[in-house]
């Protein structure tokens, strides 16, 4: 019932059209009673009553009714399709809107394949229900009720005999509904799994090929494919068990009618014309009973899908604006971490982190992989919330800033660069859609991307991303950097942004950054000392803690972890050069 209430919430926006459709279905159900009635009258009045002059008018009415019925039926099918498409449009929009507002922690836990299953297969089951199943249920129910009423009007004893099988049909229909529902839920879940395998395989196709694991992937897919087949067969087995019973019970109606009706005609309590009317009405009982099984299937499939979509629509983001969140168009960029602690589930990732950065300062963050560097800056953008302590921007806890305002003042170049299937210009201007071409070019120049972009087949109009030309890791990083610089943020966050860029280009980028970051606060996460050594403050992280902090020279003087890394990197560099000199 919950799912019906839920879908009604969408359909009721078009309730005039919806009820017009139902009314038309009612008219068609009524018209369906006319021809059986006229058939009976032709027998009793034209054939037995010898009133041949009535034959043509009766036939004329029968043809007219058939034509009107056909036109009205097609019209209301269109009405229901329109209501359905409009409702589905809104559901899809709501679902997409929800996906936009769900945060990192949701996407950490949810597989893309699951989400795609909601947006495709489940949505189709809901569309089918609203466009077809609803009116079919109404049409069949009204035809059945009108036919039963009409039969009672003509001859109550024969009508009672025909209804004798109704309780059995009701019982089996109820059993079918209850048995088939879990099988549809299982199908929907398995469909999500199958989708996830396909999606992961497509996203990771390079890894598959690099490791020559096509056979293993095929096997993985086969397991899920086989399970999907089995779940679908489980469901088919249920209705295979019940549909023949329902069909046979519906079939017994003809036997009951001929047997009981025949006796009544012989003993004179029923005219032959009335028996013909009953015979013509029998499909009106038969058909809905036969359809009941299929319609129950459709309803259960709808409920299984609707519940999944509802679940997704109900997920609330953990990161939300407070009721009176603060809005300021431009932040200054003062950043403070005060005794910050954070865990992903049970895993404590940040422990007692404290530091301060002012506008115009650059903070370098360095440390071994998994030390918590990316997590630290994720808290600054409020992609996650702190467990203990607080992160402040311009003296105010980030939880009190309006999220949109906070993030629109920051630009992050993430470690995993993502470029959309769009032109290079479109990708750079992603955060500032109304930027001029000159501004885009200027940002690309600052990111040392302009030159290689000019060498692209269509320069700034070259399509990159999923369907576009391939770019090297360093080129992708520079486009992402240009995207961030164009935004001209108060706080710039670069997470391993120049790791794939050659040393010389990195040096040029650093020079440019120095000149444009005068009033901005900048965070640079890196593994290379060369990327952070100019920073005003360097945080050295290990195992979720800041183990050393200071400037490059201060840290070298400490002769700790930083000094050790410096020696390693500098040593390698020197060795490399001496080897080059020898060769
Ligand atoms: N979304 C997540 N869910 C659960 N654990 C996570 C998540 N992201 C990171 N972690 C864990 O948190 C720890 C810190 O990860 P983080 O990405 O912050 O490290 P990092 O210092 O940036 O590493 P790297 O230099 O490799 O990028 C790691 O142990 C990692 O496994």
Image: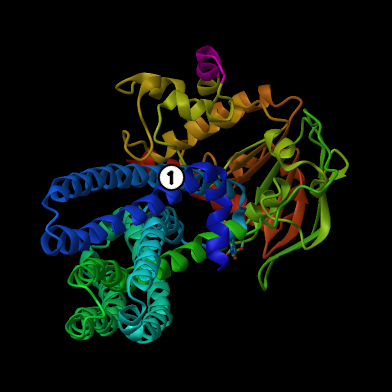
Residue occupying the point 32% across, 52% down: 31
Asked whether 137 or 262 is in front, the reply is: 262
- Quadrant of the rendering where the N terminus is positioned: bottom right
The residue at the far front in this view is: 50
Asked whether 453 or 385 is in front, the reply is: 385
- Look at the magenta stretch and give its main secondary structure: helix
Task: Name the secondary structure under disc 1.
Answer: helix
Left or right: where 215 falls relative to 432: left
Residue occupying the point 49% across, 32% down: 478
Q: What stretch is highlighted in magenta?
A: 434-442
**Is 136 a magenta residue?**
no
Residue occupying the point 71% across, 52% down: 379
| 440 in relation to 283, above or below | above
Q: Is residue 141 visible?
A: yes
Which percent across, then down, holds residue 289? 31, 73
- Quadrant of the rendering where the C terminus is positioned: top left
Left or right: where 116 falls relative to 44: right
Which percent across, then down, holds residue 251? 21, 79
- Occupied quadrant, residue 333: top right
| 279 in relation to 542, above or below | below
Left or right: where 352 falls relative to 349: right
The colour scheme applied to this rendered structure is rainbow
**Number of numbered markers:** 1
Q: How crowded is the residue under tag 1: few (<14 C-alpha within 10 Å), some, or many (20+)?
A: few
**Residue that mark 1 sits on:** 576
Left or right: where 470 falls relative to 502: left
């Amino acid at each position: 019932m919950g799912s019906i209430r839920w879908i009604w919430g969408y359909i009721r926006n078009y309730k005039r059209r919806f009820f017009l459709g139902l009314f038309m279905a009612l008219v068609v159900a009524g018209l369906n009673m006319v021809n059986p009635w006229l058939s009976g009258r032709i027998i009793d009045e034209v054939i037995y009553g010898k009133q041949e002059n009535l034959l043509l008018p009766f036939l004329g009415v029968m043809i007219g009714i058939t034509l009107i019925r056909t036109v009205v039926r097609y019209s209301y099918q269109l009405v229901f399709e329109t209501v359905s498409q409009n409702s589905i449009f809104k559901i899809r929009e709501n679902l997409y809107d929800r996906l936009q507002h769900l945060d990192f922690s949701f996407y950490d836990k949810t597989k893309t394949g699951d989400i795609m299953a909601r947006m495709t297969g489940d949505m189709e089951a809901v569309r089918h229900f609203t466009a077809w199943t609803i009116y079919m249920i109404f049409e069949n129910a009204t035809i059945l009720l009108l036919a039963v009423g009409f039969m009672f009007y003509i001859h109550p004893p024969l009508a009672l005999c025909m209804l004798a099988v109704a309780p059995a049909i009701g019982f089996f229909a109820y059993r079918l509904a209850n048995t088939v529902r879990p099988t549809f839920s299982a199908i929907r879940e398995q469909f999500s799994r199958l989708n996830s395998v396909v999606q992961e395989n497509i996203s990771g196709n390079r890894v598959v090929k690099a490791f020559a694991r096509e056979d293993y992937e095929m096997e993985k897919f086969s397991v899920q494919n086989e399970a999907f087949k089995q779940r679908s067969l489980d469901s088919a087995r249920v209705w295979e068990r019940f549909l023949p019973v329902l069909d046979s019970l519906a079939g017994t109606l003809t036997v009951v009618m001929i047997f009981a009706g025949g006796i009544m005609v012989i003993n004179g309590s029923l005219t032959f014309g009335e028996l013909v009317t009953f015979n013509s009405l029998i499909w009106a009982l038969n058909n809905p009973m036969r359809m009941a099984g299929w319609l129950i299937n459709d309803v259960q499939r709808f409920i299984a899908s609707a519940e999944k979509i509802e679940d997704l629509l109900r997920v609330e983001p953990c990161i939300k604006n407070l009721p009176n969140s603060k809005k300021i168009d431009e932040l200054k960029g003062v950043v403070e971490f005060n005794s910050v602690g954070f865990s992903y589930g049970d895993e404590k990732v940040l422990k007692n982190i404290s530091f301060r950065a002012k506008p115009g300062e650059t903070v370098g963050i360095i440390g071994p992989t998994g030390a918590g560097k990316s997590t630290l800056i994720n808290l600054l953008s409020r992609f996650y919330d702190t467990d203990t302590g607080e992160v402040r921007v311009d003296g105010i806890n980030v939880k009190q800033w309006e999220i949109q305002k906070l993030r629109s003042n920051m630009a992050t170049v993430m470690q995993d660069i993502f470029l959309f299937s769009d032109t290079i210009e479109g990708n750079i201007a992603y955060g500032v859609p109304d930027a001029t071409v000159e501004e885009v070019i200027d940002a690309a120049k600052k990111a040392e991307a302009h030159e290689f972009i000019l060498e692209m087949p269509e320069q700034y109009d070259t399509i990159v991303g999923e369907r576009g030309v391939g770019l090297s890791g360093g080129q992708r990083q520079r486009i992402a950097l240009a995207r961030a610089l164009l935004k001209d943020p108060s706080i710039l966050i670069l997470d391993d942004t120049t790791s794939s860029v050659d040393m010389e280009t990195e040096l040029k980028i650093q020079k440019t950054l120095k000149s444009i970051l005068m009033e901005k606060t900048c965070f640079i996460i890196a593994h290379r000392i060369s990327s952070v050594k100019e920073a005003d403050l360097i945080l050295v992280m290990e195992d979720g803690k800041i183990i050393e902090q200071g400037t490059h020279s201060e840290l070298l003087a400490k002769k700790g972890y930083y000094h050790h890394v410096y020696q390693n990197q500098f040593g390698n560099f020197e060795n490399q050069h001496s080897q080059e000199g020898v060769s």
